[in-house]
Image (spheres, grey):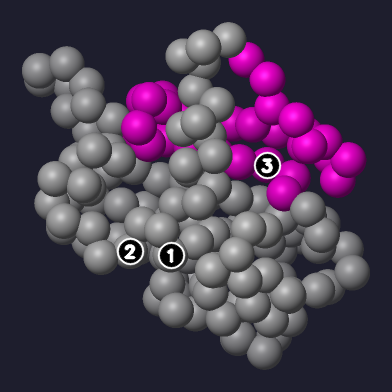
Amino acid sequence: MYIQRIIIKGFKTYRNETIIDDLSPHQNVIIGSNGSGKSNLFSAIRFVLSNDYSHLRHEERQGLIHQGSVGNSIMSASVEIVFHDPEGKIPLSSFNITPKPNNEIHIRRTIGLKKDDHQVNDRNVSSTEIFRILESAGFSINNHY
C-alpha cells in the first residue's frame, strides 16, 4: 500500500488544484527550490492523515486556506490522498465503505472557516472513523507513517 496521488486545492500556497500524480512505492524524495511548496505538501499530507490539525481556532483555519488577493478570496481548502491498496490492507467493507476501482482508496478532508468535512471513497465520515480506518491498516496517527 502506498500513496499514489495527492490532490490539493486552496490549501496554504496551493491556490489552484494541484495534482501530484504517478507516485510509486519506491519514491521517497521530494525536491524543489526554496519556496516551491515542499513543506506545504507535507503539511497537506499531515492535514489529512494525522490529528495535528484538530481543534483549530478561526485564525488557524484561515491560515490553512489560501489567502488570495482582495476579491479573490477562497472560502475552503481540500486535500485528497489516493492510496493504492492491491493487498486490501484497509478493510473497507468493515466500515461500510464501497471500494473504488483499481484498488484505490480516496481519503479527503475539506476545511472551511467554520467546519471540516471528511470523506473516504466519497462517503462522509468523521475524523475518528478515518483514524480507525488507518489504524486498521497499521498506521498510527501519533507516530510518523
Point out the image quarter for the C terminus: bottom right
Q: Tag 2, which secondary structure?
A: loop
| Kind of residue indicated by mark 2 | Ser
Point out the image quarter for the N terminus: bottom right
Q: Is residue 53 visible?
A: yes
Cα distance, mark 2 to mark 3?
A: 23 Å
Give the image quarter of residue 118: bottom left
Tell me the residue that label 1 is attached to: 51
Crowdedness near tag 3: few (<14), some (14–19) or many (≥20) residues, C-alpha within 10 Å: some
* Left or right placement of residue 91 versus residue 106 in this view: right
Q: Tag 1, which secondary structure?
A: loop
Q: Main secondary structure of the magenta part?
A: loop
Q: Tag 3, which secondary structure?
A: strand
* Left or right placement of residue 136 versus residue 23 in this view: left
Q: Earlier in the sequence, mark 3 or mark 1?
A: 3
Tell me the residue that label 2 is attached to: 54
Q: Nearer the viewer, mark 3 or mark 1?
A: 1
Q: Is residue 18 visible?
A: no
Q: Residue at point 19% right, 41% down? A: 62
Question: Looking at the image, do the residues carrying marks 2 and 1 touch, with CB atoms under 8 Å apart?
Answer: yes
Q: Residue at point 73% right, 75% down? A: 137
Q: Nearer the viewer, mark 2 or mark 3?
A: 2
- Nearest the viewer among 100 and 49 is 49
Return the residue found at the far bottom: 94
- Nearest the viewer among 136 and 101 is 136
| Kind of residue indicated by mark 1 | Asn
Q: Position of residue 95 (x, y in %)?
A: 60, 86
Up/down of 32 relative to 113, above or below: above
Q: Position of residue 36 (x, y in %)?
A: 51, 15
Q: Which residues are magenta?
A: 3-32
Give the image quarter of residue 64: top left
Tell me the residue that label 3 is attached to: 5
